[in-house]
Image: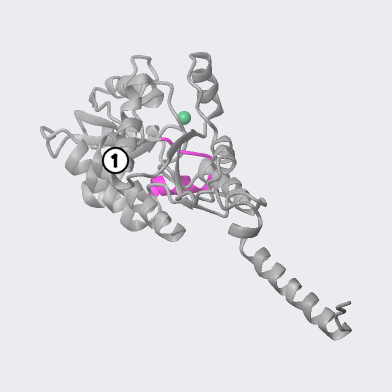
Amino acid sequence: MFRLSLKMKLVTLVLCTLIFATLKADPGQASGHSTKEEKGPAILLVTFGTSVESAQASFRNIEKLVRKAFPNTEVRWAYTSGIIRKKLEKEGTMIDSPEMALSRLMDEGYTKVAVQSLHMIPGAEFHEINVNARLFAQMAGGIDKVIVSWPLLVSDETMEKALQGIMTRVVPKQRQADEAIVLMGHGTHHPSDAIYSALMYKAQKMDANLFVGTVEGSPSFEEIKEVLVRKKIRKAYLIPFMTVAGDHAMNDMAGNEPDSWKSQLASVGIESVPVMKGLAEFDAFVGMWIANLKTAMAHLK
Ligand code: CO
């Protein structure tokens, strides 16, 4: 009868262990995942959202240009505003929150995600998605890497670029130098509200009759109105400094209620010309967000 010596048994055991260890180290062979396809990085576009149908033109333009810049890439949307999502849900349209959209991507096997904030400033919503997206990358067995890409105004350079975009593409050609341009920013309780004052400073350096007011922050519309009166301005172009020309543009800016910017200016003898277009309807602005997204995607590779 053939019997292995103790030494031979030991050698065999060591060899078997080595082979098994090698197999285990190659997940394609040993763990049964060889059929799992490697999915490329997905893009998640995150915006405040809008329930105004005409304002959707902004989102359609963003989607068109993003798909052009990143062909064959999965592109998803999420709205940060729960109020808007609930309103749309009642009308039969389901839009994900950023967290829900990330969960779906994780569930579907995407391991890399670039989240593009389509907000104007890095405010409360940007910070929330930034915190939560990072947590997804910490979960086991899911997304490995998430990059949250900057919104529009994050530097001196981007403020400059945005104002130039306003002057060359958004302001109607017939505007005369003695007519004012008043941008309507959203404004926020978040410390990043200071960006609007910085923007106002830059606007004034660019054109003495270019102003930045906000709905909920600083500079306030009151401040801007006082300056317009003091400067004896007769006519003002009102421009939403927001991704979409939605509820704020339609009501707070150009509405017929006595507290709208248009009505308040009329009461001091200033004629208003509202420009009802969201910034994302202009390719130059979408290009600024896409430039940020390109940087994020390059870091995911
Ligand atoms: Co608002």
Quarter of the image with the C terminus is bottom left
67 or 268, nearer to the observer: 67
Up-down relation of residue 26 to residue 195 (above or below): below
Q: Is residue 187 magenta?
A: yes
Protein image colouring = one colour
Can the viewer see residue 238?
A: yes
User: In the visual, does 239 lie left or right of 195?
Assistant: left
Per the rendered image, the range of residues in magenta is 186-197
8 or 155, nearer to the observer: 8
Where residue 221 sits in the image (x, y, percent)?
38, 33
Q: Is residue 56 magenta?
A: no
Give the residue at mark 1: 65
Quarter of the image with the N terminus is bottom right
160 or 83, nearer to the observer: 83
Where residue 196 sits in the image (x, y, percent)?
40, 45
Q: Quadrant of residue 176?
A: top left
> Element under label 1?
helix
Amino acid type, callout 1: Leu
Q: Residue at x 36, y 35 (%)?
A: 243
Q: Residue at x 23, y 45 (%)?
A: 165
Q: Residues within 10 Å of mark 1 (few under 14, many from 20)?
A: some
Up-down relation of residue 163 to residue 100 (above or below): below
Where residue 139 sits in the image (x, y, percent)?
66, 50
Is the CB of the residue bearing disc 1 within 8 angstroms of ligand 1? Answer: no
> How many labels sit on residues?
1
Q: Residue at x 30, y 36 (%)?
A: 64
Where residue 210 sits in the image (x, y, percent)?
25, 42
Q: Residue at x 23, y 31 (%)?
A: 237
Q: Quadrant of residue 264?
A: top left
User: In the visual, does 233 lie left or right of 6?
Assistant: left
Can the viewer see residue 209?
A: no
Up-down relation of residue 30 to residue 122 (above or below): below
